[in-house]
Image (tube, coloured by chain):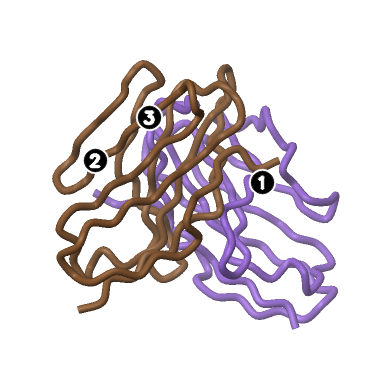
Chain colours: A purple, B brown
Amino acid sequence: GAGVSQSPSNKVTEKGKDVELRCDPISGHTALYWYRQSLGQGLEFLIYFQGNSAPDKSGLPSDRFSAERTGGSVSTLTIQRTQQEDSAVYLCASSSQTSSFYEQYFGPGTRLTVT
Amino acid sequence: SQQGEEDPQALSIQEGENATMNCSYKTSINNLQWYRQNSGRGLVHLILIRSNEREKHSGRLRVTLDTSKKSSSLLITASRAADTASYFCATDAQGAQKLVFGQGTRLTINP
């Protein structure tokens, strides 16, 4: 079956511009997670959704970052007024339950480069 | 703060040898998971071990968990070139609904 998909796969943007990253989770998965990974580093948790609500936004690095999820499916991560330090790979994952007992299925990521 | 931390940061071995990676964490957990990442892209789940388990096997993978030492190890036996990847442990905090990933171990298998 189809896995988690993300678009675009690569995005180059100028400093100060806004960007939108999209995640299509596995059909039926209620939990959706966003992570950020800088070059050679581990994953930094950003936000997770249970259905359309986001119980935990603690990882969003600043108020320039926001995310939404509609219809319990597609999610978009928006970064406003991008900065060079926002350059990273943004990974989305989904899971059948919002519990750490369930494995997360990852998308291929969006590589964001802010010039 | 980082919950899981892998050791070593990088490991290079010859094909056919065994590779051992370690993970330490700070707080009590419900379970610990190991993931593999190829080429800096999406992660693939390898194995999950629950806090009441001490050892688990899956093919050439063996995971151990020592909750008294707050540590886990991942052993890959008879390594292959295709095992070259970064390996991450991920832990939860009891009651939490999210995973916290470590910095990863970069494993290189030399033919």
Q: Does label 1 lie on the same chain as label 3?
A: no
| Amino acid type at mark 3 | Leu
Q: Find numbered disc 2 in the image and state the secondary structure of the residue it sits on.
A: strand
Q: B6 or B39: which is nearer to us?
A: B6
The subunit letter for the residue under badge 1 reads A
Tell me the distance, in whole angstroms, between the alpha carbons under discs 3 and 1: 27 Å
The label shown at residue B62 is 2
| Amino acid type at mark 2 | Arg
Rendered image quadrant of residue A20: bottom right
| Amino acid type at mark 1 | Leu
Q: A27 or B75: which is nearer to us?
A: B75
Q: Classify residue B101 as left or right of residue B2.
A: left
Residue at 60%, 26% in the rendered image:
B27
Tell me the distance, in whole angstroms, between the alpha carbons under discs 2 and 3: 10 Å
Residue under pointer 3: B65
Number of other residues with Cα within 10 Å of mark 2, as a class: few under 14, some 14 to 19, many 20 or more = some
Q: Is residue B7 above or below residue B110?
A: above
Q: Position of residue B88 (x, y in %)?
A: 45, 50
Q: Position of residue B87 (x, y in %)?
A: 40, 55
Q: Is residue B67 above or below residue B43?
A: above
